[in-house]
Amino acid sequence: MSAWHDPDRTVVDAFLVKSQFRPGSVPTYRWFLRTFEDVARRHPAVDRQMLEAWLKEMARRWRMSTLLNQVCIVDRFLDHLAEIGLIADNPIVALRRRYNVKHSKPIWRALASSNPDEEVAALRQPAPFGSVLGDFMRDHVALMHSRGYQYETQGHWILRFDRFLQANPELAGSSLETMLACWKAAKPTRNHAAECQKLGRLLTKARHRLDPGIPPKRFDARPEREVAREHRRPHIFSPSDVRNMLNVARSYPSPNAPLRPMVLYTMVLLAYCAGLRRSELARLDLGDVDFQSGTITIRQTKFYKTRLLPLTGSVLAELRAYIDARQRAGAPQNPESGLFWHGHFNDRYTPRSVSTMITDVMRRAGFKAPTGRTGPRVHDLRHSMVVNRILQWYRAGVNPQDKLHFLSTYMGHRDINSTLVYITVTQDLLQEASERFRAVGARCLTMEARP
């Protein structure tokens, strides 16, 4: 008996219409899903065994690397089948829940291997907060969230420490200091040592909060200082550098996605002119742009802040040109749709894809090596915006100190100290500051003391 109840064979076509894929991709996707449908009709249920049978059949026609790059369409199709009630659950999602795996592709790769049982079992990850300190750390993270902190980085430290404790149950009766010392010894790098120090500090404070009788412990600050000394200095792009990147983005080769050059051009423009983070670019909605007031709205970003940013007339003109091109490309026009849209899956770009594409523009513009992580980062555009804005203030005769709190608000920082981190002292900035001191403050050094 087949579990596939689609006698008219309409489900695949309905899914393709709903997803609004690019017209050129639809025939390939239809063929791909029809082969999946044919295998499903021969099985009593759409389950793991059925998926393994389909993968084996497809492996005879496609290279495995190509096949694994295409399974995302089947994953979305399985979600659609669960949504319309044709199947009870997406079996890939069920396996991810069972083995605590974040992404689907490792599950597909394991199912396509010669020994699926062993490969899937090897993916199993420890359950979050399953260690001897799990309840204590879970409560601490929940408390920080309730106080309004996103606590993402610290949460990652805590989960890594939790997995380490689960993998070393012999530490269950040890003190917190001993556990932290063992975790530090497990990976002898400076970054890990600094992470252990910071985690130890926050867990000690959390323990002291619960029991004031436990004295707080002083930690060695040297590992953090050593990491800070090795931290890569940001690359400050000059306005001419940014114009070069914009020219490269506008001519970006993308025959299968004609809108992409305009997408990249506008991303680089907003990353520099508005100082947006890559996640803020990815989360922008079409309705966040208000041409009447000349602003864009950045919603619920770092520190749970929402801010309204005014834009110059030239930036608004480029943004309007992009939105017109976006409409001509057939992008959805509802206000909740992603501002930076691509037609491949009729969806918005992710923060990771934003970073990958802008990094490629930097490589093509000659600012970054063809391979590797050395050279400028996407976030350096945000640093460059701050430094060049202060340079403009100096050259206009404006005292930057009087304007820093405005700049801090525009950048979405929690306080002015976060903005000061972005002020990289370049040669131009040092020269302008020295000139201002010569014109305004140097005479104070030569004034005779009055009686």
Image: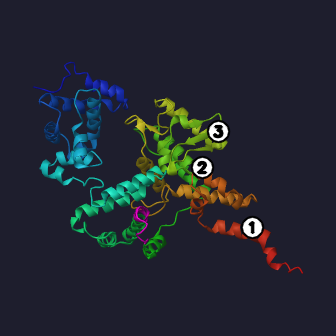
Q: Residue furthest top?
A: 8
User: How far across and how far down the image is residue 119, in percent?
Assistant: 16, 52
Q: Nearer the viewer, mark 2 or mark 3?
A: 3
Above or below, 38 against 137 in this view is: above
Task: Determine whether, in the image, residue 446 is placed left or right of residue 99.
Answer: right
**SS at mark 2 in the image:** helix
User: How far across and how far down the image is residue 10, in percent?
Assistant: 26, 21
**Residue at position x 41%, y 49% from top?**
352
Q: Amino acid at mark 2?
A: Cys
User: Which quarter shows the N terminus?
Assistant: top left
User: How far across and how far down the image is residue 102, in percent?
Assistant: 30, 48
- Residue 294, numbered label: 3
Residue designated by label 2: 273
**Residue at position x 37%, y 29% from top?**
20
Magenta-span inclusion, residue 213: yes
**Which region is colored magenta?**
205-216
Q: Earlier in the sequence, mark 2 or mark 3?
A: 2
Give the spatial CA distance, label 3 vs label 1: 33 Å
Q: Earlier in the sequence, mark 2 or mark 1?
A: 2
User: Which quarter shows the C terminus?
Assistant: bottom right
**Residue at position x 30%, y 55% from top?**
129
* Of 133 and 315, the residue lying toward us: 133
* Of 162 and 399, the residue lying toward us: 162
Residue designated by label 1: 436
Q: Residue furthest left?
A: 1
Q: Amino acid at mark 1?
A: Arg
Label 2 crowding class (10 Å Cα cut-off): few <14, some 14-19, many 20+? some
Task: Determine whether, in the image, residue 430 is placed left or right of residue 108.
Answer: right
Give the spatial CA distance, label 2 vs label 3: 14 Å
* Of 76 and 304, the residue lying toward us: 304
Q: Earlier in the sequence, mark 3 or mark 1?
A: 3
Q: Amino acid at mark 3?
A: Gly
